[in-house]
Amino acid sequence: MILNFITINLKKHLKISNNIFLLILTAAVVLNGCGKESPKKEFIARVNDSYFTSEDLAAAIDSSSSRNFYRNEIVRNWIDKELLFQQAENSGILKDKNFLRVKNESEKQLAVTFLINKLFEEEKITIEPAEVKDYYEKNKNNFRLFHNAFLINLIEFDDEDKAIEFRNKAFDSNWEKSVEAFKADSNIVYKEHSHLVYEYEVQPADLIRALRELQAGEISIVINDGTGNFYVVQLIQRYDKGTIPPLEIINELVRNRFMALKKEQFIKNYVKELYSKNDIEVK
C-alpha cells in the first residue's frame, strides 16, 4: 500500500547486525518465554496454556522494521510459531543434545549482543560534522550509485480530493508551503522529503513513469495506485548510475557508515583489552 523505499546500501555493518540480533532475540523468547504459563485474564491470543498479551504485541511492533507489518499478521505469526513450538516440545526436541548445544550458543550470542549494546550506551560515541565530511571526501568512490536514482519529494493520501488539493497548492506556491499547510491532515498516509531512491525500487508503475517524464523541479499529477491511495511526487534531481551524490544528499548514510566504523573499532579495542585481563590458552 505504502511506497517502500530502499536507500543506498552503503553501510558497513558490525559483526552482529540488527537482523541477527532480532533472530537471536526471537529464539530466546521462544525458548524461555513460551510454553505453559499461568492463565491471564487479559490476552490477545492463546494456544493451550500459552498466552499472547498486549505487552507482547507492543514489543513485537517495536521490533518490526516494516511499516506494513500489521497487528493481525503479528498475532497470526505468534500463533503459528507457538503451535510449532509446542509440537516440538511434545516431540522431545527441547531435550535433544544438538538442540541444547545450539540453544547454549544462541544464549551466548544474545548475551554478547546485550553487552555490546550496553557498552555503546555507556560510551555514547559521537561524531562531528567535520569528521563526516572528511570521511566522505576520503571515501567518495565508495558512495557511487549502483543504479539510476531520483531525489524526490513524495506524499501519499488516502483521499483523492485531498491529494488534488495538495497538488494544486504545491503547484501554485511550492512544495514546502503545501506540506506545511497539510501537516495536520489525517488523510496523509506517508511522506518523504529530499529522499534518494533507486529507479528500480519505485512503485507503483505509474509513479516511475511519471518520474521518468518529469524535469527537475516539476510536480506530477495525482497518481492513483488502484488500491485507494493517491501519490503526488516532485522530482528534485535525477542521478545516473555511477554518480556520486553530494554529501548533503546522503549525509545520513555517510554518517551512519562512519559511526559503524567507529563502533567496530571501539569493540576491537575493548576485546584487545580483555585479552590482556584474562587467562587465555590455545593448544
Image (cartoon, rainbow, N blue to C red):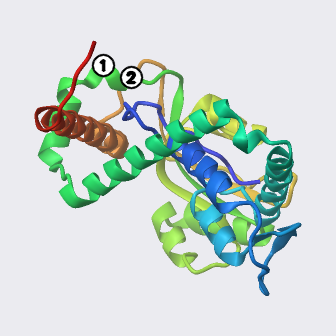
Q: Is residue 148 above or below residue 23?
A: above
Near mark 2 (Cα within 10 A), the count class, few <14, some 14-19 or many ≥20, is some
Determine contact: label 2, label 1, CB under 8 Å. yes
Disc number placed over residue 144 in the picture, else none: 2
| 132 and 272: which is toward the camera | 272
Query: Going 72% across and 72% down the picture, which residue do you hit?
Result: 162
Which residue is situated farthest in the top direction here?
283
Q: Secondary structure at mark 1?
A: helix
Q: Is residue 111 visible?
A: yes
Which part of the image, by quadrant, shows the C terminus?
Answer: top left
Disc number placed over residue 141 in the picture, else none: 1
Q: From mark 2 to mark 1, how far is it between C-alphas?
A: 6 Å
Amino acid residing under circle 2: Arg
Q: Could you tell me how many numbered marks the image carries?
A: 2
Q: Position of residue 172 (x, y in %)?
A: 56, 65
Residue 56 relative to residue 38: left or right? left
Disc number placed over residue 267 in the picture, else none: none
Residue 251 relative to residue 86: left or right? left
Which residue is situated farthest in the bottom direction here?
41
| 33 and 159: which is toward the camera | 33
Near mark 1 (Cα within 10 A), the count class, few <14, some 14-19 or many ≥20, is few
Q: Position of residue 148 (x, y in %)?
A: 53, 25
Q: Position of residue 262 (x, y in %)?
A: 22, 39
Q: Position of residue 187 (x, y in %)?
A: 71, 74
Residue 35 relative to residue 258: left or right? right
Amino acid residing under circle 1: Asn
